[in-house]
Every structure is written in C-alpha cells, then in structure tokens.
Image (cartoon, rainbow, N blue to C red):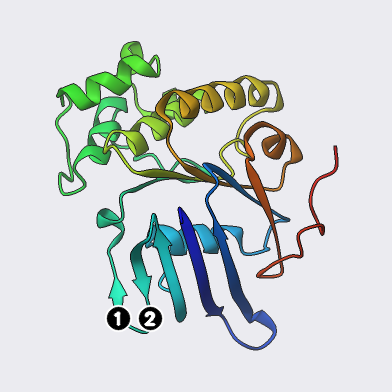
C-alpha cells in the first residue's frame, strides 16, 4: 500500500480546539486531499512529512512505517524520503537560487556557498529553466520562478514522494493553468508519487488519480464535498 495514514492530533483548547482525526489508505500515484481552508489538510500533510507529531496513530508509505505511536517509531523528516513544497514556498531570503536548491541537497549544510555546484544542483537548474536565475535572490523572482526554485529544492534530494501544499494558491490567476500543466508533465516524467492538497477544483481536475474530501478534520464520505465538473 503506497499510503496508509491514520492520525489523531488535538490542537488548542476550549473554543480554539481542533481535532484532526484522519484515516485513509490509497495506492494512487496522484492523491489529492480536497477541502476548504481550515479543514486539516495541511496538518495531515505535515504529519506524513514528519513536521507534525500526531498524538496517536500511524503513517506508512510503501508499507514502511514512518510513524507509529504504539511502537514509538517516529522517523525524522530528513529520513522519510519525501519532498515538501510549502504553500508560500519558504525560500530562504538570504540565499540565492543555487544556494536554496543546494540546501535541499544537504540540509546539514546551513550556508551553501554562492557558487554551490554539484551535478544534482545543476541538473535541476537546467531541468526547471533556472540556470540564468542561479545568482538571484527570492525577492527578485516572480511567483512562478519562486515556485520552480521550491520544486527544485524539493526534488534535488531525490525523494520517494512529493508532498504539495496548495502549490498554486500564491500565484496570479493567469499563471496557474500553465504551471499546473508544467508540474503535471514533470510528475509524469519522473513517475514520482504525489500527495497534493487544495481547495481548488481545477487542481483536482488536473492531478487527481484519487481524491479524498477533508472537512472539519475528518475524511468525508466518498460522495460528499467533492468538486463537481
């Protein structure tokens, strides 16, 4: 089973209490978690990535246990073999494009050199059309360029899967269709499993082999809350 997730996490208290109680199993190569803002999609993705420790449950990928509360297994994020694309891309403003990508290759390398090289970094500079932007800093990049840098940083470590948190939400509307197509083509070329979260039906139409509706911290019934064509 590619994805076997059952996690419980309680956040806050009183009127601010939110309970995430999500469980699903899927063999989809392109799995989309669809739902409104605040539904628990990002918390679910972070639990898979190792960026959020559930209170109970398990996370398994390709039948390998990444987290299991009952057996105290909790692999750190760097050992889970997943790339994570944050909604706002989370590029380091003091690092140029090459350095940002190099950081993804070796997270222990806190301040990559300005001339950080290596075949892995060069591969993604070329593959994503970033070679001429290698010396620029994030504040000098467009939204689409920042997205490509973030994707390169996620892919340079050769992850087994890619987790994408609303990857088009930060983009202007005219860019979204083209960049959806670009990312879809890249995923198909790499045959890389993805979990993508979104509240946009257009993302579902482009990416979903399987779609799960998430609402109020739960997986909704199969026919509920899904986008309509």
Residue 40 in picture, x, y percent from top left: 62, 64
Which of the pair 11/123 is nearer the observer?
123
Which of the pair 129/100 is nearer the observer?
129
Tell me where residue 94 sits by quadrant.
top left
Residue 25 in picture, x, y percent from top left: 55, 61
Are discs 1 and 2 less than 8 Å apart at CB?
yes
Residue 206 in picture, x, y percent from top left: 66, 31
Taking the spot 52% from the left edge, 22% from the top edge, the residue there is: 185
Instruction: Give the total number of marks visible in the rendering.
Output: 2
Q: Is residue 33 above or below residue 169?
A: below
Q: Which residue is mark 2?
A: 69
Tell me the distance, in whole angstroms, between the alpha carbons under discs 1 and 2.
Answer: 5 Å
Taking the spot 18% from the left edge, 26% from the top edge, the residue there is: 114
Tell me where residue 135 sits by quadrant.
top left
The label shown at residue 72 is 1
Residue count near mark 1 (Cα–Cα under 10 Å), binned few <14, some 14–19, many ≥20:
few
Q: Is residue 75 above or below residue 192?
A: below
């Amino acid at each position: 089973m590619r994805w076997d997730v059952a996690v419980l996490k309680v956040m806050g208290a009183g009127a601010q209490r939110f309970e995430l109680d999500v469980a699903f199993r899927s063999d989809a190569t392109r799995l989309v978690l669809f739902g409104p803002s605040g539904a628990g999609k990002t918390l679910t993705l972070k639990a898979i990535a190792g960026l959020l420790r559930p209170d109970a449950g398990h996370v398994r990928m390709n039948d390998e246990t990444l987290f299991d509360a009952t057996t105290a297994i909790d692999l750190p994020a760097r050992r889970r073999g997943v790339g994570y694309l944050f909604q706002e891309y989370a590029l380091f403003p003091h690092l140029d494009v090459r350095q940002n990508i190099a950081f993804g290759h070796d997270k222990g390398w806190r301040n990559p050199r300005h001339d950080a090289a290596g075949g892995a970094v060069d591969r993604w500079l070329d593959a994503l059309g970033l070679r001429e932007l290698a010396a620029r800093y994030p504040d000098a990049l467009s939204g689409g360029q920042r997205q490509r840098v973030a994707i390169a940083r996620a892919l340079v470590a050769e992850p087994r899967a890619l987790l994408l948190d609303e990857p088009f939400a930060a983009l202007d509307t005219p860019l979204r269709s083209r960049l959806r197509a670009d990312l879809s083509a890249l995923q198909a070329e790499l045959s890389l499993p993805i979990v993508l979260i979104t509240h946009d039906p257009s993302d579902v139409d482009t990416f979903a082999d399987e779609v799960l509706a998430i609402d109020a911290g739960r997986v909704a019934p199969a026919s509920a809350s899904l986008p309509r064509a």
